[in-house]
């Protein structure tokens, strides 16, 4: 696992800036550090910050519209950050790029964070937001028959859990799930989880243990498919998926195992590994060619699922 030259330059910049591993920080320190790396995204036709009713009270969302006239397809997007970090700004670069490149409305969800709000608060918020987009499609200029769920890391976990919940609860109907280096199993027992341990990288096994400890209420939650979707009794009937993984990422193998399990269950699934890059690389599209390539791949997959190309 050798970082490519652009990735290595980013890692060197992080080191020079005094990067500290997440698992060595308090929650407050980790949140400040996470926010310090937020970049500015591309312009979109229109953006509105809004609050919607959520299971725990008002739930903030950010809605991006593409150029053109609707009704548009829509992507409900869940940010990463281990269910502990992140907000509407942290993945705004990716949301804006997908809005423009996939010609879809993107609704980014600021779900409740742990440890203040333990599992399953984030899951409940994610599902409620997806239902809200479907129920309010007309006022959002959205076509409710072309609705996808997506996210990065912990957000990828929430996207596929929402897909499972939508299947079990009879809706909303989803046509696609976009899973960018998703968290799928709390066991952390894969070769990549055991291999990616250097604190030089943005995410390590120790970091994932830190996130799981803050997110879950107890050991029993690790076996709940709403936390570990790889443990769902069946994945049959889920919407088609794209799974994007990074070679230098403790989540690499569990994402690829999940893609294989989806395929075995009869779900049309594509899986792409990007070599030489770490967890979080998709959000580095401003600095990283492979980040831009991954965003373009995600947009193509969404356009295909939305029957736009």
Image: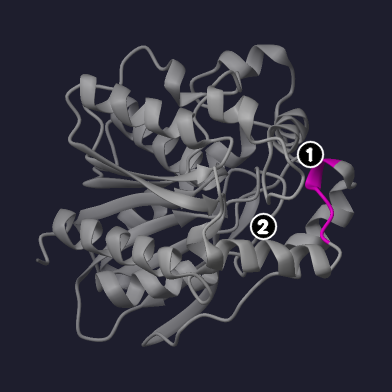
Q: Earlier in the sequence, mark 2 or mark 1?
A: 2
- Quarter of the rendering occupied by the N terminus: top right
Q: Please state the horizontal and vertical placement of residue 166, each as a whole percent of the image.
A: 33, 34
- The image's mark for residue 86 is 2
Q: Nearer the viewer, residue 230 or 247?
A: 247
Residue 209: image x %, image y %?
A: 73, 29
Instruction: Give the residue at x 32% y 54%.
Output: 135
**Magenta stretch, residue numbers:** 19-23
Query: In the shown orientation, is residue 2 left or right of residue 98?
Result: right
Q: Quadrant of residue 257?
A: top left
| Relative horizontal placement of residue 301, taking residue 224 as reference (left or right) | left
How far across and down, in percent of the image, does residue 28 sit? 87, 54
Give the total of numbered labels.
2
Distance, label 2 to label 1, CA atoms, is 13 Å
Residue 115: mark in rendering = 1
Residue plotted at (64% across, 36% down): 196
Q: What percent of the width, then of the height, locates residue 8?
A: 62, 62
The secondary structure making up most of the magenta span is loop
Residue 174 vs residue 181: left or right? left
Image: 78 above or below 194: below
Residue 206 vertical position relative to residue 279 in the rendered view, above or below: above
163 is higher (above) or lower (below) than 47: above
Mark 2 neighbour density, 10 Å: few (under 14) some (14–19) many (20 or more): many
Which residue is depicted at the point 49% across and 52% down? 276
- Pointers 2 and 1 in contact (C-beta within 8 Å): no
Relative to 203, residue 190 above or below: above
Quadrant in the rendering for residue 12: bottom right
Indicate yes or no whether the magenta region holds residue 133: no
């Amino acid at each position: 696992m050798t970082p490519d030259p652009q990735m290595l330059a980013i890692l060197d910049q992080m080191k020079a800036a005094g990067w500290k591993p997440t698992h060595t920080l308090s929650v407050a320190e980790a949140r400040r550090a996470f926010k310090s790396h937020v970049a500015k995204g591309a312009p979109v036709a229109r953006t509105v910050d809004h609050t919607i009713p959520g299971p725990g009270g008002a739930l903030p969302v950010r809605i991006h519209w593409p150029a053109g006239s609707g009704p548009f397809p829509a992507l409900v997007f869940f940010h990463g950050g281990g269910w502990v970090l992140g907000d509407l700004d942290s993945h705004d670069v990716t949301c804006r790029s997908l809005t423009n490149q996939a010609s879809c409305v993107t609704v980014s969800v600021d779900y409740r964070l742990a440890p203040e709000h333990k599992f399953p608060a984030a899951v409940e918020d994610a599902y409620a937001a997806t239902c809200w987009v479907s129920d309010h499609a007309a006022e959002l200029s959205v076509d409710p028959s072309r609705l996808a769920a997506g996210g990065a890391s912990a957000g990828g976990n929430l996207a596929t859990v929402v897909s499972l919940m939508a299947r079990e609860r009879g809706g909303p109907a989803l046509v696609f799930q976009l899973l960018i280096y998703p968290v799928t199993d709390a066991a952390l027992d894969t070769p990549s989880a055991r291999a990616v341990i250097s604190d030089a990288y943005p995410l390590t096994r120790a970091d994932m243990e830190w996130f799981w400890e803050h997110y879950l209420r107890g050991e029993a939650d690790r076996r709940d498919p709403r936390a570990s979707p790889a443990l769902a009794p069946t994945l049959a009937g889920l919407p088609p998926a794209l799974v994007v993984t990074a070679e230098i990422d403790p989540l690499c193998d569990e994402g690829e195992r999940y893609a294989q399990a989806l395929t075995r269950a009869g779900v049309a699934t594509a899986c792409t590994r990007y070599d030489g890059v770490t967890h979080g690389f998709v959000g580095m599209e401003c600095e990283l060619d492979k980040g831009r390539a991954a965003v373009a791949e995600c947009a193509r997959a969404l356009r295909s699922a939305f029957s736009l190309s």
